[in-house]
Image (tube, rainbow, N blue to C red):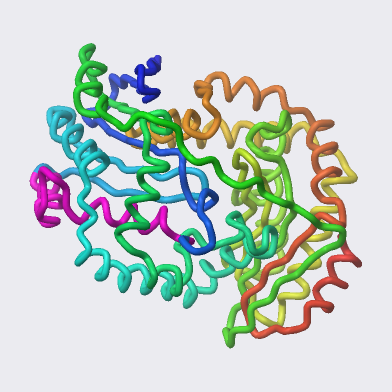
Amino acid sequence: MYKKITLKNGLRIITVPQKSTQAVTVLVLVGTGSKYEKKEISGISHFLEHMFFKGTKNRPDKLEIAETLDKIGGIYNAFTGEDYTGYFAKVAASQLEVALDWVSDIFLNSLLPEKEIEKEKGVITEEINMIYDNPMAHVGVLWSKLLYGDQPAGWDIAGTKESVSQMTRQKLSNYMASQYVAANTVVCVAGQIKSDIESKIKSYFGGGKDGSFTPKAKVIERQTQPECLLHFKETDQAHLCFGARAYNLFHPKRYVQDILGVILGGMMSSRLFMEVRDKLGLAYYIRTEVDANPDTGYLITQAGVDNKNVEKAVAIIAKEYKRISREKVSPKELKKAKDYTKGKMALLLESSDAIASFYGIQDILEKNVLTPEEIYDRINKVSAADILKAAKDIFRLENLNLALVGPFKDNETFKNIIKKNG
């Protein structure tokens, strides 16, 4: 059973013991990401994440930062999202003290050396180039731009080449001071841990900065008809994201939405996988995913399709959206989707790093934590009537959107396909 405490400075500490592992994960999360940025510093959350590996007061040499965990076979990394940034180390349980020292050091004591900032501009620029050269990745960036436009929710998490090139130590330092405060931070330790773990965590992380943090801007969503955003690129295969605005994390039907996505394209026996890949052979990969954040949400089907079959694939997906919003799913299909979701979660939560993320991310986003059993209970309560009602709400014609990377320029063609079949 997990335990949560909050220190006087607002730092939240979550501990989750696991008897069935020889590993332990230390994860620290701060409640800031690309949605908290302004145009002139777009990408700064991601840039700062990179800089935490470039030298600290205790480990000024970046080689020492890497070698500390390499020497003990540790797994370590960091990640940036729209609403949070995380840093973690996973080690053998006997090396817990090393992990606590290492994660707290990069999180609290990073030096942000100017020479390394200049180098990292080139690294991140190449990361941006990599994303834009990969249509499968680029279409996801295009999707956010289509839904939210020129506001933080619509910007690439990595920023732009221009904003990255203008990053300075002062900007990074100011942003860190405004967001990286104890009250905006969660430390989660999961795995084989002992009873004195809380005092150890306090000793390493308790000195975090006091104070408030800068909130994010409100996301503006406007849509009155189906929309398309095409990026012309000479490819043999077009990559698409086709879906709809949907429910956020706090919506009472968020778990209904999850099951809806699984039924449509979340597993190999789902409707769209069977229709588009197995029956018609139009795509190698096709999947439906749900993304629910504190203030935004959407459901998308993503696929890679031969250029000559793109219009057909879009029409089929639209028809499946319409069908599930008009006909109740069968008890058998509903049970399969529920059991799949619960079973997949149970398998994912076998490792200490997944456990740490499961509890930590819930708390940083929702200020509340549900156990797996509590989530299973909510999934069990989803009915066929719930699925039908949510599908009717989500798949309204004026709510549909298509982002596409491939050799296409005519938005109206795809809008007409959506209107005809959606």
Q: Residue furthest top?
A: 195
Could you tell me residue 31's position as x and y percent? 46, 39
Picture quadrant of residue 125: bottom left
Q: Nearer the viewer, residue 401 or 381?
A: 401
Quarter holding residue 29: top left
Query: Residue pushed farthest bottom?
Result: 234
Q: Is residue 23 left or right of residue 230?
A: left
In this rendered view, identify the residue nearer to me: 97 or 307. 97
Q: Is residue 154 left or right of residue 228?
A: left
State the image coordinates of residue 108 (x, y, percent, origin top left): 25, 39
* Residue 132 in view: yes
Query: As rendered, which of 358 and 317 lies closer to the eye?
Result: 358
Q: Is residue 53 magenta?
A: yes
Residue visible at 44% across and 74% down? Answer: 161
Q: What residue range appears in magenta?
A: 42-71
Residue 23 coordinates in the image, percent (x, y): 23, 31
Residue that appears at 22% across and 16% down: 199
Q: Residue at x 23, y 18 (%)?
A: 197
Question: What is the x, y in percent for residue 360?
Answer: 42, 31
